[in-house]
């Protein structure tokens, strides 16, 4: 019998000296995901929004485990010494054995503890661990799949961490480990194979094979029960990934998903019915005061309008007060997320607005991370020009106000013809000349590495939405997740959503995790 199948049980009775019930203060919870302090997709939001309540409930016994990414750590994590003695000994032992493990607080609401593991530093173990993976689970991972190789490294390192922590505990530990998605799932399977005293939970927020099948124009939901999963995964060259995900689902003591439709999908594709459905939660109190929400909407909309002024400088021939902001956001899955349908709809909307001579302008944002090498120079120049125009206007305004004040101070009405002198007009003319632009406003805010093959840009070229003056629908492709530290659009995702008028998510493959509820 395959090891994964023999370990596929839900009872905790197999754990040595572990009662079915125990005091929560005696337990330690490790929550393990590739997106801890490392934004890749929606799981980052899931963990970030639940962290405060989980940290309040578990206190000093709650630890998030993720990969160490230096660029993220600099802005999101405060590195400190471990507070838990057993965990400190475990981390020290791993570091002395050739690993790099960091401990700190994630700078989000709740400030949870995080354990970050540098997977690249231990890449020299990859071949050895791949052999162990094959010997114990009969799963082979090809050398060219970097993401799967990272999953192997991360899985072995997290299992090492949990095993070392259990060994360093002075009394028999009560360890709960909650693993999210296939990238972290190998650690769960290794915990079971090594018979570590760890109760395991595996949550899938979507299935790998489901994503790939939907992206391949398959009638997915009507044929869910009929797929030959091994063949379909092999045909798409993701069989090794699928095996990692399925092994984690089958080995977990408790298997969960985020929605009923994903539960049905997991039952057919991963061959295990979820034990429980755990819908993602929302902090609804943040959005309960309507007047406050309206004020926040106005503030966020003003910030988006400032970006628009810079992006379209020289072609700002539309009224921003009659401008609607639409957006689509998420993983860059062109068909699965419905970006293809959205673009086709925008092209038709542009035609209708033009033939009806409408004075309404629609600006559609595409917030989807893609491969880039830097910001677009023209986009950066637009924001610099906008700022320079603002500074010029403020300088002229101050000089005008000073002359007006001095005139009123001596009891005279000001001579309007003398309020602006030659220098003022020179400054304003220079500012106007700076807004002259020979090219169209850019569609993409960054330099794409493969723009000729990019699905969104290719579709835009076909439908002809080039941000010309005649177009009533403008398109802005922002191939990077939003951040408050960005020099272009310094806004977090939630702030951006508040400032827009409509979010459009015509997904074909939708696990119904967060997207619908967050946009209400």
Image: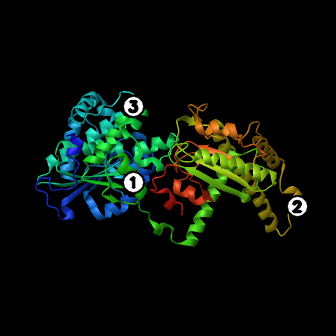
Q: Which mark is residue 415?
A: 2
Secondary element at tag 2: loop
Q: Position of residue 197 (x, y in %)?
A: 16, 50
In-image side of 138 versus 225 (left or right) = left
In-image side of 147 versus 437 (left or right) = left
Q: Earlier in the sequence, mark 2 or mark 3?
A: 3
Q: CA distance from mark 3 to mark 1?
A: 29 Å
Q: Name the residue rendered at 68%, 37% in the picture.
A: 462
> The C terminus is located in which quarter?
bottom right
279 to 98, vertically: above or below = below
* CB under 8 Å between discs 3 and 1: no
- Of 395 and 26, nearer the camera is 26
Of tags 2 and 3, the one toward the viewer is 3
Q: Which residue is mark 3?
A: 145
* CB under 8 Å between discs 1 and 2: no
Q: Earlier in the sequence, mark 3 or mark 1?
A: 3
In-image side of 425 versus 246 (left or right) = right
246 to 306, vertically: above or below = above
Quadrant of the rendered image containing residue 446: top right
Q: Is residue 71 visible?
A: yes
- Of 350 and 11, nearer the camera is 11
Q: Which mark is residue 264?
A: 1
In-image side of 404 versus 3 (left or right) = right
């Amino acid at each position: 019998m395959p090891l994964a199948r023999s370990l596929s049980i839900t009872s905790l009775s197999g754990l040595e000296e572990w009662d079915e019930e125990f005091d929560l203060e005696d337990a330690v919870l490790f929550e393990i995901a590739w997106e801890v302090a490392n934004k890749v997709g929606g799981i980052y939001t899931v963990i970030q929004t639940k962290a405060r309540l989980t940290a309040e409930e578990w206190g000093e016994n709650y630890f998030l485990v993720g990969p160490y990414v230096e660029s993220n750590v600099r802005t999101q994590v405060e590195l400190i010494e471990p507070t838990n003695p057993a965990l400190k000994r475990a981390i020290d032992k791993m570091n002395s054995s050739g690993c790099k493990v960091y401990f700190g607080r994630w700078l989000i609401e709740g400030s949870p503890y995080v354990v970050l593991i540098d997977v690249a530093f231990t890449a020299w173990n990859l071949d050895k661990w791949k052999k162990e993976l094959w010997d114990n689970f009969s799963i082979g991972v090809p050398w060219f799949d970097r993401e799967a190789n990272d999953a192997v490294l991360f899985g072995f390192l997290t299992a090492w961490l949990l095993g070392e922590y259990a060994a360093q505990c002075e009394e028999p530990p009560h360890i709960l480990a909650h693993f999210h998605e296939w990238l972290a799932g190998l650690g769960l399977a290794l915990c079971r194979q090594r018979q570590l005293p760890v109760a395991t939970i595996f949550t899938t927020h979507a299935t790998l094979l489901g994503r790939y099948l939907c992206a391949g124009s398959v009638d997915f939901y009507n044929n869910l029960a009929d797929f030959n999963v091994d063949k379909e995964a092999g045909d798409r060259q993701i069989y090794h990934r699928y095996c990692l995900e399925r092994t984690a689902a089958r080995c977990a003591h408790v298997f969960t998903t985020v929605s009923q439709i994903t539960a049905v999908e997991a039952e057919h594709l991963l061959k295990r019915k979820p034990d429980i459905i755990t819908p993602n939660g929302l902090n609804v109190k943040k959005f309960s005061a309507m007047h406050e929400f309206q004020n926040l909407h106005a503030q966020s909309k003003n910030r988006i309008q400032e970006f628009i002024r810079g992006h379209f400088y020289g072609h700002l021939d539309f009224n921003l007060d009659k401008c609607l902001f639409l957006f689509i956001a998420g993983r860059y899955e062109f068909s699965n997320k419905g970006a293809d349908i959205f673009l086709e709809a925008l092209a038709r909307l542009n035609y209708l607005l033009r033939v009806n001579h409408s004075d309404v302008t629609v600006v559609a944002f595409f917030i989807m991370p893609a491969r880039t090498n830097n910001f677009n120079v023209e986009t950066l120049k637009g924001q610099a020009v906008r700022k320079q125009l603002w500074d010029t206007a403020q300088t002229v305004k101050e000089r005008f106000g000073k002359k007006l004040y001095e005139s009123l101070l001596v009891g005279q009405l000001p001579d309007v013809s003398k309020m602006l002198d030659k220098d003022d007009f020179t400054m304003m003319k220079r500012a106007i000349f700076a807004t002259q632009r020979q090219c169209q406003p850019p569609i993409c805010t960054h330099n794409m590495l493969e723009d000729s093959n990019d699905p969104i840009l290719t579709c835009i070229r076909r439908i002809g939405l080039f941000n010309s003056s005649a177009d009533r629908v403008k398109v802005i492709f922002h191939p990077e997740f939003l951040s408050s530290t960005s020099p272009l659009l310094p806004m977090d995702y939630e702030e951006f959503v508040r400032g827009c008028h409509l979010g459009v998510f015509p997904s074909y493959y939708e696990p119904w995790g967060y997207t619908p509820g967050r946009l209400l």
